[in-house]
Structures are given as C-alpha cells and as structure tokens.
Image (spheres, rainbow, N blue to C red):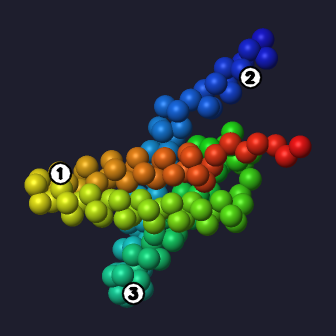
Amino acid sequence: MKPVFRLISRAWAASPKRKMASFALVGLCNTAIDFGVFMLAFRILGLPIVAANIVAWLVAVSGSYVMNTMITFQAETGRVLRRKDYVNFAMSGVLGVIATTATLVVLSWHLPVAAAKLVSIAVGFAVNFTMSNLVVFRRRVPKT
C-alpha cells in the first residue's frame, strides 16, 4: 500500500493546480508581510516611502523564496535553498512588479482604479508563478 500512497503523493505534489494554490497562499502570506514591514519601516522607523517599500519588498521576496522552495516547488528544489535560485527569484519578482504596474496604469485609463488594481494583482500572480515555475524552480536534470 505504501508504494501506491507515494505515487499518489508525488502526483499531488506535481499537480499544476496544487502548485498554483500553494503559490497563491504563499503570496497571501507575503502580501501581509510586505504590508506589515512597510508600515513598520514607514511609520515606526520613519523611512521615506520608497526606502520603506524597498525594504518591505526585500523581506517579502526573501520569505516568498524560502516558502516556495520548501513548499510549492519542493519536488523541483529538493527543499534546498540556493543563492543562484534566490537571485533568479528576486529578479523574476522585479518582472512581476513591472507587469503589475504597467497593467494598473493602462487599465486605469479604461476602468475604475480599484478594478484595475484587482486585474493587475492577477497579472502579477500569473507572471510571478510562470517565472517561478519555468525559470527559477524548474526541474533539474541530474548530471551524468
């Protein structure tokens, strides 16, 4: 019975829907971390808005990398943190910020800002998940 359980477990772990759901939950956690660190840096530490935002993004992207390595993309990473993967993950996050901002600006010309923001969040999720899945956490081929 154990081999059957392992097979089902591996299939569940590799499921794109499971990965997307896990990625979304990690993203929700990191959204809260980003907001909390930003408010702490801005209100309590008195950092300027841009500096507080950069600090918050760095903390959130670091937490996101760790959680995604250990949970969402565990099959691809073997739960091993790698500097190169972290840098790629952070760089892919920059692409997500650019995509989100561009979407928000363009859609705000045609939609209410709140609606544009909701769509831009979805676009950012899609870009970040795609970059993470195809670039940062891709399955490694064993060296022969």
Neighbours of disc 2 within 10 Å: few (<14), some (14-19), many (20+): few
Task: Name the residue at 72% across, 60% down.
Answer: 82
Front residue of 101 and 19? 101
**Residue 40 relative to residue 74: left or right:** left
Residue named by callout 2: 6
Measure how far apart labels 3 and 2 are at the Cα level.
50 Å
Residue named by callout 3: 47
**Residue 136 relative to residue 20: left or right:** right
Do tag 2 and tag 1 residues touch (Cβ < 8 Å)? Answer: no
SS class of the residue under badge 3?
A: loop
In the rendered structure, which disc, 2 or 1, sits on the residue that comes first in sequence? 2
> Is 80 located above or below residue 20 in the figure?
below
Front residue of 18 and 1? 18
Q: Position of residue 131 (x, y in %)?
A: 51, 52
- Residue type of the residue flagged with mark 2: Arg
Question: Can you say which quadrant of the picture contains the N terminus?
Answer: top right
Callout in the foreground (3, 1): 1
Question: Can you say which quadrant of the picture contains the C terminus?
Answer: top right
Front residue of 73 and 91? 91
> Is 62 located above or below residue 141 in the figure?
below
In the rendered structure, which disc, 3 or 1, sits on the residue that comes first in sequence? 3
In the rendered structure, which disc, 3 or 2, sits on the residue that comes first in sequence? 2
In the rendered image, the residue lying farthest to the front is 144
SS class of the residue under badge 2?
A: helix
The quadrant holding residue 90 is bottom right
Measure how far apart labels 2 and 1 are at the Cα level.
43 Å
Task: Name the residue at 57% across, 60% down.
Answer: 89
